[in-house]
Image (tube, grey):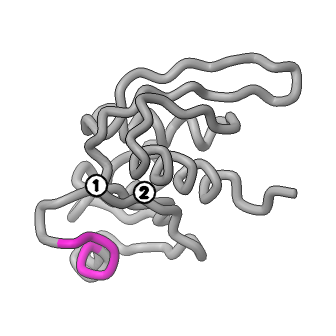
Amino acid sequence: MRHDLLSDVMSAIKNAEKVGKKECVVPASNLVKNVLKVMQEHGYIGNFEYIDDGRGGKFRIELKGRINGCNAIRPRFYVKKDEFDMWEKQYLPAAGVGILIVTTDEGVVAHTKVKGRKGGALLAYVY
């Protein structure tokens, strides 16, 4: 039984990257799709496609071998516009390395897009 789908997906991606796989298949949801789009925009993964299996669907993700670490952030802390530096220090290995994935009223975006302008809830990190 799944409790946190995003956490399961991030773990599957990280584990597939560690063993050198070229692709992985993960469960699908709208939140997962939006997070994968952000990761793709920043070059961490290649293309991904939806596979309809009749039970909610799956995504097949092309891996590029660029992910050293990724995970979902639980609980989903709300971050004010001037607090991103504190969370970067907690979850990312160095300044300018990696992204925090945040949900805002603009949708799911990387923290670099909204840093200093508005806040949002932390979903995941990738570096």
Residue ID at (36%, 74%): 80
Q: Height in image: 69 above or below 62?
A: below
Q: Amino acid at mark 1?
A: Val
| Residue closest to the far front | 19
* Residue neighbourhood size for the residue with mark 1, other residues' Cα within 10 Å, grouped as few (<14), some (14–19), many (≥20): some
Secondary element at image label 2: strand
User: Percent position (x, y) of residue 87?
Assistant: 32, 77
Q: Determine which residue is flagged by label 2.
A: 102
Residue 24 in picture, x, y percent from top left = 54, 34
Q: Position of residue 53 (x, y in %)?
A: 81, 20
Quick one: 24 or 42, which is closer to the camera?
A: 24
Residue bearing the label numbered 1 = 114
Residue 75: where, in percent of width, then height?
A: 59, 76
Q: Quadrant of residue 126?
A: bottom left
**Figure quadrant of the N terminus:** bottom right
Q: Main secondary structure of the magenta part?
A: helix
Q: Earlier in the sequence, mark 2 or mark 1?
A: 2
For the record, the magenta segment spans: 88-93
**Residues at discs 2 and 1 in contact (Cβ within 8 Å):** yes
